[in-house]
Structures are given as structure tokens and as C-alpha cells.
Image (cartoon, rainbow, N blue to C red):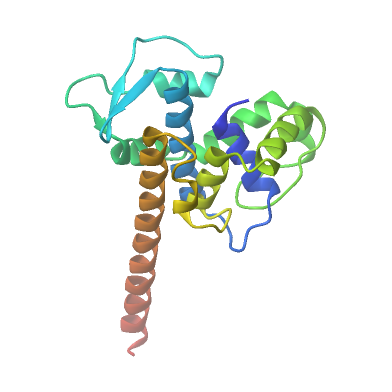
Amino acid sequence: MTTPQDLLITAMDVASSRPVGQGDLSLALAGAELIDLLDAQALTLEGDRIVPGPEGTTDDRMLDGAVSSLIREIPYESVEDWLWRRGRGLASAYVAALEAEAPDTRRRHRWNPLRSGRPDGGDAPARRHAADRWASGEPVLVGLATAAGIHDAPAEEYVGLVDDAVVTVLAAVSDAVTELEAVRQRRSIEDAAFDNIWRGE
């Protein structure tokens, strides 16, 4: 199992104080991919720039897709730019990938990353793996869940428990989610103002 898979299952299984937005989860999943690829030595970070390693494959189709989409020209891509580019629609892609691996689950339960749910059947080992990481308080998973809004905890709580590159990714995910929420609020205000004009208020 990969960190993005564990994060998605955690988003579906763990009660949250607020609904988890698909965009927030997608950004966190893109960050989770970076962290797994750092661990696999498929890339390194120079400051906030993603420096790809030699091209290769992982044991996971989604992570292979992430590797193949790395920008390999100097000055390379920033972590922030990666999150926005790779994160587009990523939650839906991971849901589809997990459903493809557990066809019985797809027939019985339509997974929704925005809703807590407990899938049945063939995904039990995957859910157990994610639950074990969550129960142990594993810093990377909990840090990503915190950034995505699945879990409420100060982000600085995890500094020192992971290396500097992972801290850089976690901070970028948190900043991107905050920026996305600001965009949502701005659009909501603009839509309300537009509605008021049409109503003559």
C-alpha cells in the first residue's frame, strides 16, 4: 500500500469535524505521492524544487504515473506547482483505482471521498494497513490528514518527527489547501454579490 492509498482510505473512514473537500484531498494526495517518491529515491528536493532521479518504475500504477509526469528540465518544478498540476482531479483518480482493485466493493458500495464510509470485501487488507498507520499516529499520514482537514492538530506538531524534505511537502500542502479555501470564499462572496444585483438589492 502507498501513502496516497492510505490517505484516501483514512479520509473515508475517519470522522472529520468538517466535510473534506475533493480539492483539498486531491492536493494532499499529490503531496503524498511526492513523499512516497522521496522515500523511493525517485526524486529529491533542492529547496522547494523537485529534482527527478533516474527514470524507473515503482510497484504502483498511480505512482508510476506520478514519476512519468515529473518535469525533468531545469529549473524544475516547485512543490507548490506540482500540487496544483498533479492534484487536479487526483482524488477521483485514486477512488477509481481502488475500486478497480476491489470489484466487489464497486458493485456494493460507491466510494465517495467526501463521505465517511466503510467499504466491504476485497479491500480489507488495504483498510487494515491504513487503520494501523492511523492508529499508530504515523507522522506522515497524520500530517497529510491534518493539512487536508481530515484531522485537527497543529501542523508544527509533526516538525522534527520527519525529515526536512517531508516538512517542505507538508507545509506546501497546508498552504495550498489554505489558498484553495480562500479562492472558495472569494467566489462565494462574488456569487452572492452577483445574485444581489439580479434581485435588485
**Residue at the spot 42% in from the left edge and 30% down from the top edge:** 34
Q: Position of residue 165 (x, y in %)?
A: 37, 33
**Residue at the spot 17% in from the left edge and 27% down from the top edge:** 75
Q: Position of residue 93 (x, y in %)?
A: 53, 34
Instruction: Please tell me which residue lies in front, 138 or 100.
Output: 138
Q: Position of residue 144 (x, y in %)?
A: 51, 44
Instruction: Please tell me which residue lies in front, 81 or 173.
Output: 173
Q: Position of residue 119 (x, y in %)?
A: 76, 40
Q: Identify the residue at the far right of this view.
A: 121
Instruction: Please tell me which residue lies in front, 30 or 121.
Output: 30
Q: Quadrant of residue 101?
A: top right
In this rendering, the answer to whether 185 lies above or below 53 is below
Q: State the quadrant of the C terminus.
A: bottom left
**Residue at the spot 38% in from the left edge and 77% down from the top edge:** 192
Instruction: Please indicate whether residue 94 sits to the left or right of residue 23 in the image.
Output: right
Q: Identify the residue at the far left of this view.
A: 75
Instruction: Please tell me which residue lies in front, 86 or 3.
Output: 3
Instruction: Please indicate whether residue 53 sits to the left or right of residue 90 in the image.
Output: left
Q: State the quadrant of the N terminus.
A: top right
